[in-house]
């Protein structure tokens, strides 16, 4: 493995760890807040951190694939294994797409809630459940 690529990947992993720490801290707030609007804002922020994480891994995957770094590719593939059997970049981009769509729906709900369709309102409920489940997992993790 080339030292330059290893250094870049290490830097990306450090950034991902910062995003994960932010998500963990935010998880506690999301689980304790009662106000629906405040919780929605926190969920939006949580998804923003998740989006950043996937973007960082996309960058790392592109660099690793471009340089033929098999160990880095293997490591990232292990992280994205539960997301299907597509090519690595496709799996990451699917996750990016899902997260981006979640954020778009939450933005619409924030700006123009009266224009939400039934499907979008239902989607917001499912996004909330999804994020709350993740928050519960984050709070169970030891530091």
Image (spheres, rainbow, N blue to C red):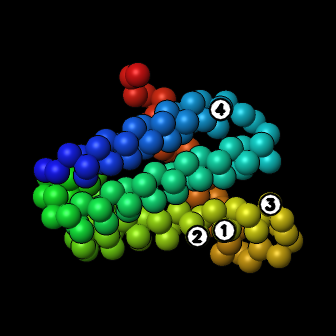
Q: Position of residue 94 (x, y in %)?
A: 41, 71
Question: Could you say which disc has been placed on residue 29 in the image?
Answer: 4
Of residues 122 and 43, which is closer to you in this image? 43
Q: Position of residue 66 (x, y in %)?
A: 24, 68
**Kind of element beneath mark 1:** helix
Q: Quadrant of residue 59?
A: bottom left
Query: Which of disc 4 and disc 1 is earlier in sequence?
Result: 4
Location of the C terminus (image quadrant): top left
In the image, what residue occupies the spot 66% across and 75% down?
119
Relative to 68, say whether 134 is above or below.
above
How many neighbours does mark 2 have within 10 angstroms: few (below 14), some (14-19), or many (20 or more)? few
Q: Are marks 1 and 2 in contact (CB under 8 Å)?
A: yes
Separation of marks 1 and 3 at Cα, in angstroms: 10 Å
In the image, what residue occupies the spot 44% across and 42% down?
15
Separation of marks 2 and 4 at Cα, in angstroms: 23 Å
In the image, what residue occupies the spot 73% across and 64% down?
107
Question: Could you say which disc has been placed on residue 104 in the image?
Answer: 1
Relative to 65, say whether 9 is above or below.
above
Separation of marks 1 and 4 at Cα, in angstroms: 22 Å
Number of marks in the rendered image = 4
How many neighbours does mark 1 have within 10 angstroms: few (below 14), some (14-19), or many (20 or more)? few
Depth-wise, is mark 1 or mark 4 nearer the camera? 1
Of residues 13 and 29, which is closer to you in this image? 13
Query: Which of disc 3 and disc 4 is earlier in sequence?
Result: 4
Answer whether residue 5 is visible to the viewer in this image. yes
How many neighbours does mark 4 have within 10 angstroms: few (below 14), some (14-19), or many (20 or more)? some
- Residue at the spot of label 2: 101
**Kind of element beneath mark 2:** helix
């Amino acid at each position: 493995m080339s030292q330059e690529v290893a250094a870049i990947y290490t830097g990306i992993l450090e950034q991902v760890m910062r995003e994960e720490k932010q998500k963990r801290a935010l998880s506690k707030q999301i689980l304790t807040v009662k106000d629906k609007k405040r919780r929605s804002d926190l969920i939006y922020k949580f998804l923003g951190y998740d989006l950043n994480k996937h973007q960082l891994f996309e960058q790392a995957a592109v660099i690793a694939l471009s340089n033929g770094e098999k160990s880095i590719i293997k490591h990232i593939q292990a992280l994205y294994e539960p997301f299907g059997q597509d090519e690595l970049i496709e799996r990451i981009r699917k996750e990016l797409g899902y997260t981006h769509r979640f954020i778009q729906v939450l933005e619409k709900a924030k700006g123009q809630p009266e224009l939400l369709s039934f499907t979008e309102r239902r989607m917001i409920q499912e996004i909330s459940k999804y994020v709350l489940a993740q928050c519960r997992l984050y709070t169970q993790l030891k530091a």
